[in-house]
Image (cartoon, coloured by chain):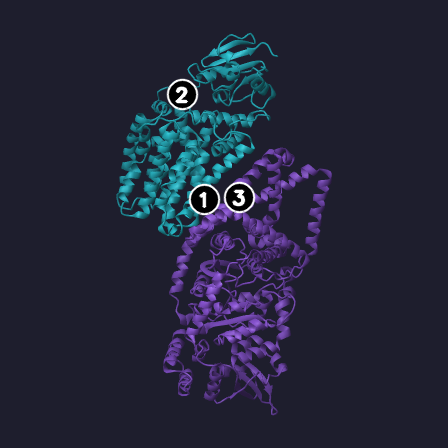
Amino acid sequence: MTRLLRFGIYTVPLFGLLLLPVLWVEMHGFVSDATVQMWAKTILQVEGPQAFRGTDPFYPPLPYAVTLVVQALVPRTGIPVPLLVSAAIGALLLYAWFGNLRERGAYDRVSAGLIVALLAMNPFFLRALVNGPGTMFLLLGFWIYARGLLNLRLNGTAPDMMKVAVGLLIMPVSHGYGLMLTLGTLPFIVIAARPSMLAASSFGYIVSMFFPAVAAIGSLVFVASVLDTEIFPAGAVAAGARFEFDALLPTLCALAVVAAALWRTRGVPRFFLPLLAGACSLIGGAVLNLGYGLEADPVVVAAPALGLVIVAIRSWPPSGLRASVIAAVLVASVPLGLWSIRAGGGAESLRLLQAARGVAVADTRAADRAAAAYLAGRDGVLADVERNPGLVTAMGRIDGLLVAGQTAYDVTLQGGRPRGDWIAVRHLPDAVSQPDRLLGAFPQLAEDGSPAFALRFSHAPWRIFQIIEQD
Amino acid sequence: MALDGDSAAIGELLLDRGLLTPAQLDEATARAEEWHVGLIEVLQSRRWLKPGELYRALAFYYDLRLVDLFEAPPDIDLVRQQDVTAMTDALTIPVRRMAGGTLVVATARPGPRTLLHIIETYPGDVEIVVAPQLDISWALQTAFREEQLHRAVYGLADTDPVMSAKSVITPPQVVAIYLMISALLVGFATAPVASLIALNVVMTLFYTGNFLFKAVLVWVGGEVQERYSRAIAAEAAAMRDDDLPVYTVLVPMFREPEVLPILTAALRKLDYPLAKLDIKIVLEETDDETIAAARALELEGVFEIIQVPQSHPQTKPKACNYALQYARGDFLVIFDAEDKPEPDQLKKVLAAFRQRSPNTACIQCRLNYYNARENWLTRMFTLDYSLWFDLMLPGLERLGVPIPLGGTSNHFRMDVLRELNAWDPFNVTEDADLGIRLTQKGYRVGVIDSTTYEEANVSIPNWIRQRSRWIKGYMQTFLVHTRRPIHLYRSVGLPGVIGFVFFIGGTFLSGLLNPIFWATFLVWMIFGADAIEPFFPPILLYMSLLNLLAGNALLVYLTMVAPFRRRWTDLAPWGISVLGYWVLMTIASYKALKQLISNPFYWEKTQHGLSKQTANELDAAKSDAEVAT
């Protein structure tokens, strides 16, 4: 059997299996904000008018580019395209983990399969899966980084070094929190280095390790500058995270297996130190995120820990009971993980838990769907689709919408002169500032008092007006 | 193995005459037994005796006349009737026919085996005389001078002209290039913007392929090397000296007398029985200075000076081809004058030949520099070589892509080397060309983990001269091996063709194309996107951006990764400045292109011995030599 065929035989069913929990929670009303935003951006880019030019379209570039390609290939799936990508990355990861445990960890087929299955059922894995490709790429990146760290200590070859660098490169281009995590590795990467590599120059070692990440971030800044666009979506940083110890609980609990492996390898520095460096990197990233708040949900912050878990399992010293002990620890880590999610998880994770239990959660997209239903078949609709991605995903297409880059939209937004037939705004009464830029340009739409507009539809937070008068 | 009777008796004779001390005789006897060679071979590898003394003793022992072939040169016509290779191997030569019809045959190795050879080769009455080995070698070189010179220069061009760079470009290639230029001009005339975009697409795709290919090479090369290295080192360590074959070491030199002591010191340090080394110091006969320096060193008998007659082209491959005709080894390696191979290199190579597939005809060892930290250029050169030899060449081997051999430390099976007519004297990177030719002829080239340390260029003008020659040679090699594209495809396969195009073509094409993209970037930065937008539709712009940012970053990063295998982490940050090195490469590329057109066979000489560290090495080698005497 060729490698390609074997790859297909394993990953295609895995892909299907991973879609099941995704569809299950969606059926119960849960779709993550990250998924909605990513999907909307790709729909706009693929199906939008030629003139469309987003102001904050490309970060994070890696999941965005991949989703864009898939959206172009299979535009009408019914399932959010980012979740398809997410499931594909998940299948790839599980397949790679299985192979890694077999080849590098010398696990038998049954043990490796059992371990991988338990990891796939881990709540942090499911959280990453439904959060979209960004989080899955983040997990992939951290696994490559952690694997490289261990191999670098064991072998010290160029590909091992490249793994560390590739991991550090993937993380910041996959997820906003990836930047924090990459920075979080900085103080600890030296712990795992082979002494011989530090002997000549520790500075040279550090510079080489971080060059790809710095180059990636520099490239993003350069592209943003030459394409005259933003790097981060507006408000991403402002979203913030809670500066509380609770927020670290998911990360600490996700490291339960790693802690056990650290204890088991405490006398073997070549295993112990890379694992320690990986664990410290995760904690470092999580602490940094408390301060800078690039990811609001601590459960998403904890998800990359699974990459280190697989490295820890691969490093576990061989013994007769190895697989059984690891399976037991993995099983025990599930309730621990669930407890940490309840104790320290973000609102979205809590909603996910509910949906996973089969409880229908408040569907945040209901209003979007109602607005989309009203707009179906109408043309000349002005809408700030970048700030309201839910409207795009609810419509599943953007026919009839006037968006950034089109003259009517730009004149309306920048010139203060409404063009088109309809204007749809999202009004959040409790918000300090309204994210909807059309509402910002026409604050009177928050009320009903303007002769130029006639309110035709209202389903909080959506308000849709017919444009009566144009200058 | 115990010493044979003749060797023991000759040893006693030398002891009796006071030419050897008892300790020297004991050591020589021990070495002869350990290496499984005769006493004379061991004595040839030591400087205890002057050549005349040894051969006088031999003549006395065998009761033969000693002749001086310099004073009484042999009859050229007689010599030319014999096979030069057989005479070289047996160290015999016919001198003259006496009045009574008796043939006088001189030998440097009198004994039963030579006697048998003489009886088989020279029927009738024969008088055997003794002559020093160097006399015989010199006489052979004189007798076959023109014939061997012609073979050295035209051997490949006569027998396999399509593989020779004697014709820089063939008529079909001229037609192909003419058609391409015509198509381009027609395009510019009729649809200039579309043509520029099309050209841009081709160049952009080439760049993308180039950097991806290099990344794959480094990844693959790094993965495979460690496993093989351990197996080869283990087998090399277990080798017995008495099993080792005779190994020819060619050292072509030209006007570099200053590095001779370093070279001879390094060769003496090889972990290989010196008596089984057939070392040829290959010098141009007009290079009086180096010839005089070599003679002044009073080297051991295993060092033989080969003087190459002056002729066009005056290139290293021609000199090597000439010297090859006097080589006696089963294997052959080329070292440059300033090379310092790792002592166990020859044994590792033999182990590699045993472990690799039977069609492996050449083993390339790694090259690196002993003066890496002397200045910015030496650091960059070291990073360049580390990337090339430590990571990319093992990757090429793993992927089955033809390997362009690097200038020195390539070890050959002698039979294959001769079968292929050795090096192309018209190609100024004859080694790279030979590597590709070997693959095209069905042989494999291996790469092993043994390093030869050289002197990195410390001077930018000198570096540009050297690099322009290499790039010109790559251009020649590319032109030679693309003459028959279908044959190339059939002999090396699709991955081989792709690898060849990116590795050989990419090396000089990127140097030539870089200024175009640098200029475009500058125009963009200075005049804004409007200036370039017509020629960069969005998808092309994104691809170009990918090349500019990801491609360049990746190449910088690969340069930084390169020294890690040797744990030279202090060099890694210098990789960030590789852009400056690329500028130098571009200058060298254009110089090479100009020379390819105006003076294709001109050999840009690299001056060695400029490094401070080389000066230190020279002092150390001189003191070592004094201790040895």
Tell me the kind of residue under disc 3: Asn
| Residue A56: x %, y % from top left | 51, 27
Q: In what quadrant of the picture does the N terminus of chain B appear?
A: bottom left
Residue situated in front as seen by the camera: B586 or A30: B586
Task: Please identify which colour was used for chain A in the image.
Answer: cyan
Whether residue B434 is situated above or below residue B486 in the rendered picture: below
Question: Could you classify mark 2 by the number of other residues whose Cα lies within 10 Å: few (under 14), some (14-19), or many (20 or more)?
Answer: many
Q: Farthest bottom residue?
A: B100
Whether residue B214 is situated above or below residue B166 in the rendered picture: above
**Which label belongs to residue A3?**
1
Quarter of the rendering containing residue A168: top left
CB within 8 Å, label 3 to label 2: no
**Which label belongs to residue B552?**
3
| Residue B388: x %, y % from top left | 50, 53
SS of the residue under disc 2: loop
What's the distance in space between the residues labelled 3 and 2, CA to CA? 46 Å
Residue situated in front as seen by the camera: A189 or A107: A189
CB within 8 Å, label 3 to label 1: no
Q: Please, which chain is the residue tagged with disc 3 on? A: B
Q: Which chain did the image draw in purple?
A: B
**Which label belongs to residue A29?**
2
Whether residue A428 is situated above or below residue A9 in the rendered picture: above
On whether disc 2 and disc 1 are found on a single subunit, the reply is yes
SS of the residue under disc 1: helix
